[in-house]
Image (tube, coloured by chain):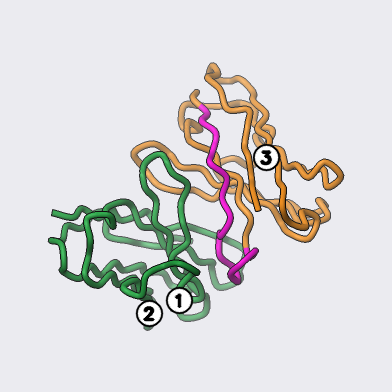
Chain colours: A green, B orange
Amino acid sequence: YELTQPPSMSVSPGQTATITCSGDAIPKRYASWYQHKPGQAPVVLLYKDTERASGIPARFSGSSSGTTATLTISGVQADDEGDYYCHSADNDATSVVFGGGTKLTVL
Amino acid sequence: VQLVESGGALVQPGGSLRLSCSASGFAFNSFSMHWVRHLPGKGLEYVSAVSPDGLNTFYADSVKGRFSISRDNSEETVSLQMSSLTPEDTAVYYCVVVGFYYEDAFDVWGRGTMVTV
């Protein structure tokens, strides 16, 4: 099972970044999202498609429609630069996968 | 809640290595434990998992037959025995708890340990 993300994205500060995650089982399975910066452990941003983890700013939001889950970062800041991964499971919940990751560059 | 990995090292292709993860601050024997690796220049890959009682395990296809996960609930540790290592196994290996704070989320991570093959 695979989850497909765009490999990279560039946005200017203050703009909105929209990162997609596509997979056949997305309609049946929740997605979660993680931010990963060099030298640090990944941090969970969102779980159950739309729920924000504690301490995560409100400008991080999630949605899911059809076979695509989406992470939206409104008012992007320089500190948001890093890699973003989605995570979900297949239809039978027997295979747990991460998307390939999206490298977000803040111009 | 804390996870501390150890055991990462430089190893020759074909060699073996044992990673350990020491847990503290939570009811270790109530949670499944997981290993996730970050491949350099690539992404995160789910590697292995063990159930709370240690009786059920899961392995990614890429490591099946070469890696073995186990846990010691009395010592609150989980281990990953890796053998027949290849350069493709070079990665930072993270020990992770799923669902501690948030349902089905990888929400508690260790700092990782580097394995270089």
Q: Foreground mark, 2 or 3?
A: 3
Q: Chain of mark 1?
A: A
Residue B53 seen in the current view: yes
Residue A22: quarter of image: bottom left
Residue located 65% across and 63% down the image: B100
Q: Position of residue B111 (x, y in %)?
A: 53, 41
Indicate whether residue B108 is drawn in magenta. Answer: yes
Q: Residue at x 46, y 56 (%)?
A: A43
Q: Element at badge 1? A: loop
Q: Secondary structure at mark 2?
A: strand
Evaluate if marks 2 and 1 touch, with contact meaning CB atoms under 8 Å apart. Answer: yes
Region in magenta = B99-115
- Answer few, some or many: residues within 10 Å of disc 3's Cα (few below 14, many 20 plus, some between 14 and 19): many
| Picture layout, residue B29 above or below residue B43 | below
Q: Which residue is mark 1?
A: A49
Q: Tell me the CA gap for discs 2 and 3.
A: 34 Å
Q: Is residue A68 visible?
A: no
> Could you tell me how far apart the alpha carbons at marks 2 and 1 are, in whole angstroms?
6 Å
Numbered label attached to residue A63: 2
Left or right: B78 in relation to A106: right
